[in-house]
Image (cartoon, grey):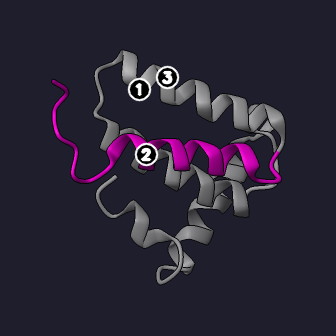
Amino acid sequence: MDKLDIHNRQRRLELAKNSIRACSASNKNKEAILSFSNYCFAEGLSVDRVEHYLRIFRKILEVFPKDFESANRKDIVELVRSARCHRGNFLNDFAYW
C-alpha cells in the first residue's frame, strides 16, 4: 500500500509543472526548469522542495524576459535587485530557499 499523502504532494507538483508549461516564457527556459526539476529528484530532493523551486521559477519567468542561457551577471543582479525591491510580492517566496 502506498503511503497516505494528505497534502496531495504529487498533485501539487504536477500543477507546478503544468504552470511552467503553460506560461508564456520561451520554450528553452521552460525546458531548462523542467530538466532542473528532474535533476533535483536525481539528487534526492523531496517532492515538496522541488515543487517549491518550481513555484519560485514560475515567478522568475514572469519578471525575467531573457533566456537563461543568454543572461549575464548584470541581468541576474537586476533580477535580485528587483526581487529585493518588491518584498511584499516576490521576495517572500525566497524566505527559506
Q: Residue 5: x percent and y percent?
A: 22, 44
Report how many numbered discs are placed on residues in the image: 3
**78 versus 88 height, above or below:** above
42 on left or right of 54: left
For marks 2 and 1 on the same chain, the one whose residue lies earlier in the sequence: 2
Residue type at mark 2 is Arg
Instruction: Answer with the quarter of the image where residue 69 lies.
Output: top right
Assess whether mark 1 and mark 2 are in contact (beta carbons under 8 angstroms).
no
Residue bearing mark 3 = 38
51 on left or right of 30: left
Q: CA–CA distance between discs 1 and 3? A: 5 Å
Of residues 77 and 32, the one drawn nearer to the viewer in this rendering: 32
Assess whether mark 3 and mark 1 are in contact (beta carbons under 8 angstroms).
yes
On residue 67, which mark appears? none
Q: Residue 21: x percent and y percent?
A: 71, 42
Residue bearing mark 1 = 40
